[in-house]
Image (tube, rainbow, N blue to C red):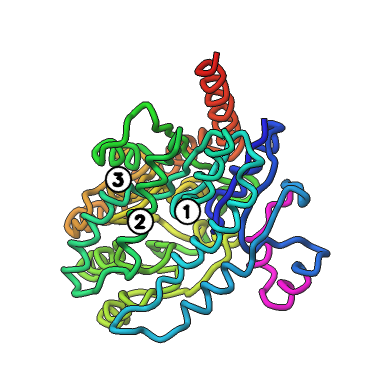
Amino acid sequence: MNVIVANASKNQAYHTALAAQRAGYLKFLLTTVYYKPGSLSGKLLSLALPQARRLNRNLPELQLDKVRSFWWAEAAARLAKKTPAIGGRRLPWYYIQNVLFDYWAARYAAESDIFHGFDGCSLLSMRRAKMAGASCILDLKIMHPVVANAVMEEEWKRYDVPPDASQDLWTARTCAEIAMADRVLVGSQTVFDGCVRAGVEKSKLVLVPYGYDQRVYKPSSKSDDCFRILFAGTLQLRKGVQYLLEAYRRLRLPHSELVLIGAPTPEILPLLKEYAGTYRHIDHVPQLELHTYFSNASVFVLPSLVEGSALVTYGAMACGLPLVVSENAGSIARDGQDGFVVPIRDVRALQDRISQLYTNERLRKEMGRSALEYVRNFTWETYYDRVAQVYETLSNWVAAEHR
């Protein structure tokens, strides 16, 4: 069996490819920028990026001869990202990257028995794979676009923000990919249920939660007694940062701190100015260093409006942190056991749950221990086994159909 894994960004795709490699199925990992030590591209990346960012674009266990890199799709998109806004909108750089990547990846698609693409960058590739008789898996990293759009359109209106210039194109492309796929992999029950509401057949959906690296994420002693609330992710409306900021401002907790880690998008800048002095901002922390911030926090909060199953929540739990997450965050955290799950946009609920963890140290520690124990069921090793099983089940199903 030959499996091709293709994704125009990183996400968990490196681990998906490693799952195929470990099972003996991987033909290629198709990606954009990938750090190959010793190669010409690796030397150029060494000059362009600090070590932590280079290492974030590499998974040492992956065989380098299996990796095909289309770096200039990402380079072109980053140039588009820097163009000035036209009519209040910027060029849809991420959409540009995905389309360029898809055209390139389609050249390889016919070499697969199973083509495993990711949402938004696999339409032409899947079509080519299907023409060659291959089966197709679509990895849906985030909520179904129809469901996501309904939530975000309301949010954009609330904050008088124009929708993304590529929103309609993105939706049409992803819906076409979902329709074409033989199986759709989703990372959380939240995404699964949203797909069903949007009309996707349950028989096509496969729930495969993600994982975390046990070598990196583990508990360690906190260096002070400050009650520290941590958020990590892109600072944007979709992540619900605006509701966390308001909840924390209302709480006025003595000897506490709100730390926001992540690059801000233009839409959130006015809100960050409005709440200036309320929080401490760190623009970027490499993934391999996030655990140091988890270990020095008291609680991790992710109040996302639209999400898939954010890898950062697995890492936080593995460091022994209780979570306060929204119902749309796609987290594996169990409400009342590993932390709390609250409705989206509910500032009062965020206040109440954060306050409860602030005032009750015993509860905070119990939930942190529970989170640590439970997340051990969701390592990358477990993910590899589950993905390999999906390939085998799909292959057997295809063989049975052709008898």
Q: Earlier in the sequence, mark 2 or mark 1?
A: 2
Q: Earlier in the sequence, mark 3 or mark 2?
A: 2
Residue at left offset 52%, top offset 38%: 130
Which percent across, then down, holds residue 56? 63, 61
Residue at left offset 47%, top offset 43%: 139
Q: Earlier in the sequence, mark 3 or mark 1?
A: 1
- Name the residue that disc number 1 marks: 312
Which percent across, then down, holds residue 338? 38, 41
Asked whether, in this view, residue 210 is left or right of residue 323, the answer is right
* Predominant SS of the magenta segment: helix
Q: Mark 3 is on which residue type?
A: Phe
> For the magenta stretch, what is the residue range?
43-60
Q: Mark 2 is on which residue type?
A: Leu
Compared with residue 267, is residue 382 higher up or lower down, i.e. above or below? above
- Name the residue that disc number 3 marks: 340
- Name the residue that disc number 2 marks: 302
* Residue 125 visible to the viewer: yes
Asked whether, in this view, residue 168 is left or right of residue 366, the answer is left
Q: Is label 1 in a helix, a strand or a loop?
A: helix
* Residue nearest the observer in this picture, 146 or 386: 146
Circles 2 and 1, Cβ within 8 Å, touching? The answer is yes
Compared with residue 232, is residue 176 higher up or lower down, i.e. above or below? above
Of circles 3 and 1, which is in front? 1
Q: Is label 2 in a helix, a strand or a loop?
A: strand
Rendered image quadrant of residue 49? bottom right
Residue furthest out toward the right: 38
Does the segment drawn in magenta span residue 379? Answer: no
Q: Is label 3 in a helix, a strand or a loop?
A: strand
Q: Mark 1 is on which residue type?
A: Val
